[in-house]
Image: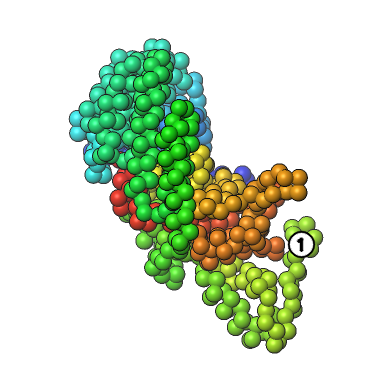
Amino acid sequence: MGEQNHKDNQPVMDVATVDDFERINPSSILAMTKTLHFHTLQDVFHGAAQAAKESGDTAAERAYSVLAVICSYHFDPNRTDAFSPQMIMDGRRSLIPSDYIGEQQDALTQVTERIDHPLLRARTADSCWYTNRKLHKMAEVASSSYLDAVNMFFTGGLLYQYESDFEVPSKVVDLIERAFAIYASAGKRKSIPDYAKETFSKAYEIAKDKLNLIAFHRLSSLGQSFELLEWMDIAKDAESMAIATKDKQYAEAVKKVWLHAAYAYSKIGDKDASTQCKVNAVDQTLRMRDAIGSSMAKASWTRDAIGELRSIGGMTERINELKLELQQYEEDSLSELGEFSIPVDLTDARQATIEDFEGLDVHEMLYRLAFASRPPEKIALHKNCLQKKNKYFLSSSIGKSYSDQEGKMIAQSPSTGFGDKPSEEWFDHESLTEVGFHYHVETEAFIKPACITMTQNECIDERHLEPLVYYSAFVPPGHEVIFALGFARMIQGDMVSAVHALIPQLENSLRYVLTNRGSRTAKLNVDLTQEDQSLSQMYSNRKEELEQAFGKDITYMFHLLFNLKGGPMLRHEMAHGKLTASNCYSAPCIYACWLMFHITCSPLVSLWKTRIEPAIQEVVH
C-alpha cells in the first residue's frame, strides 16, 4: 500500500519518469518472468525495487515500484469498474489507476508500447485508458496485448504457474473477455479485428474439444454477444459437452452447461429440446444432493430440485416423488447435530497467522479461514462468569445499564445476591464481556491478518466463493450471489459492503435451515395471517431446534452478537440503519461476517476434498 496523503487520506507514491523506465529497459521485462499472473509480476517487481533500493539506484526503484502497483490492482473483467483496490482496511486503501492521472500517466503512455511482456503491456495500457477514454491508442494496445498474452500461453511462451487439467483456464478467458470489453467500449463491437476473432476461435475450439465446461460457457456467451457464434451451434455444442461429462465433472458446471443449452434451444424456438435440457439440469441438482451425507443438506437440494421442476411445468409425477423423498430427509435430519470439532491453536499471534496463510492455494486459504478458529463454548463462558462473580462479588452483583450512541438507556441486566442462583439473563449479560474479548482477539490476531495475506497472494473474488455457497445448506436458493459477494468483500477488506450484504441474510438463513429440518418458522396472528418469526422470536421459541442444527455454542453467539439488548445487537442496528461506516470495521462486525463464513463452510467439511476443492481449482485454473 502506498504512503497516505494526510489531506485526503488517499495513497500517494513517487512519480517514475520516462528516464526512470528507460533505466530498467522496458523491452527486457519478459526475461525477468514469463508468468501469466499479475500477482507474480507484482512480486517480481517488488523484489526488483528492493534490490534497486539496496544498490542505491533510486530511478530503477521508482520504475519497478510503479510497475508493481500497476500489477496489484484487483481485476474483474465482468464489471464496468474492472480495476479496484487490492485492499481496503481501516479507512485506507491501496492505489488504483485514478491515482496515476497526470504526470505519471503521461510517462506510462510513452513507454507502454516498448514493454515486451504482453501481459504487463496490456495492463499498463488498459489502466491508462481506463481513466482517460481519449487515449484511443492505449485501448488498441491493451486489447491486442491481452490477445498476445493468450496466444503466447497457447504456444508456451507465457507460463501458467499452477497444475491444471484445463487447457483454457479461467485466467485466459478473463483476458479474452477484457479485450472484447475494450473493443465494445471503444465503439468497435461491429468491427472486431480478425486477430481477435482468430484468437477467440482458437480458445473456443480448445475449450470445446477438451471439455472445459466453464471456459466453454463463458466463451460461447461472449461469442454470441459479439455475433461470432449462432445459437444453433451453441445449443448443439453445449448439449454434446453436457452429455459427455454428466457423470464425470463438477455437477454445478455440468448443470450450468445444460441450462445454457436449454436457453440456446429456446432462442431458436425448439421448446421440446429446451425442456429436456432443463430436466437434465435438474438431474445434476439431484446428483449434488446424492453426493452428500447430511439429511438436512439433502432436504435443501431436494427443495431446489422441486422448485426447478415446477418452473419447467408438466412435471407433476416427478415432483410428487421428490416430495416423498423430501419428507423422509426432513424426518432424518431431526437426529443430526450441527456441531463440528476443529483443532485450533488460539494462541497464534498475528505474524504466525500471516505465515500460516502464505504460499497456500486458494482452496486451502478458504478452508483455513473457515476452520482455524471457532466460537467460544457457552459452558466455558458461564464458568468464567461464575468465577468472576465469586472473586469480584460487588461488581458482579450490581446490575449494568446499557446506553445507545445517543445516550438513551436501552437495557439493564439483573442483579444477583451472593447466595442466589444467577438467572439465564444474568449469564447472558455477563458473557458479553467474555465474548467481546474473544472476538476482539480473533479479529486482530486471526481474521484481519488472514484476509490481508490472502488478498496479497491471490486476487480472490466472488467466483472463488461460488462453490461454497452453492453447496452449503446454510445458503437459501437465490441468495448464493449475495453470500459470495459478501464473503469476497470481507476477504478484500471492504467491510462496509460485506456487513451490509451478509448480516441481513442471517435471519432468513436460520429460518431456511429450520424449515429444511421440518420446523415451522411462521407465526399465526389473531387475524389468521402468518408471518415469519424474527431472530429474537426464533431464539425464544425455537432455541432447542437451533441448537440441534448449529450446536449450543454457535446458537449462543447468535443471541449475544446479533440479538441481546446491550450487546452489539447487529440484527437490530442493521435493520434500523444505525450502523455507520466506521462501525462496519469494528471487531463485532468483522467477527460476525467471519462467523457466517464459518457456518456456511461447516456442512462442507466432508465434501471439501472431493467437491469443493476441485470446484475452486477449476475457477482458479
| Rendered image quadrant of residue 66 | top left
Write the residue at 42% across / 60% down: 371
Farthest residue to the left: give it: 155
* Residue 28 in sight: no
Expressed as whole percent of the image width and height from the top left, the position of residue 194 reads 30, 14
Expressed as whole percent of the image width and height from the top left, the position of residue 422 reads 67, 79
Farthest residue to the right: give it: 408
Expressed as whole percent of the image width and height from the top left, the position of residue 305 reads 43, 38
Q: Nearer the viewer, residue 382 or 62?
A: 382
For disc 1, the marked residue is 410
Its colouring scheme is: rainbow
Q: Is residue 594 left or right of residue 218?
A: right
Vertical position of residue 288 compared to residue 144: above or below: below
Write the residue at 47% across / 52% down: 330
Amino acid type of the residue tagged 1 in the rendering: Ile
Write the residue at 19% across / 33% down: 156
| Rendered image quadrant of residue 379 | bottom right
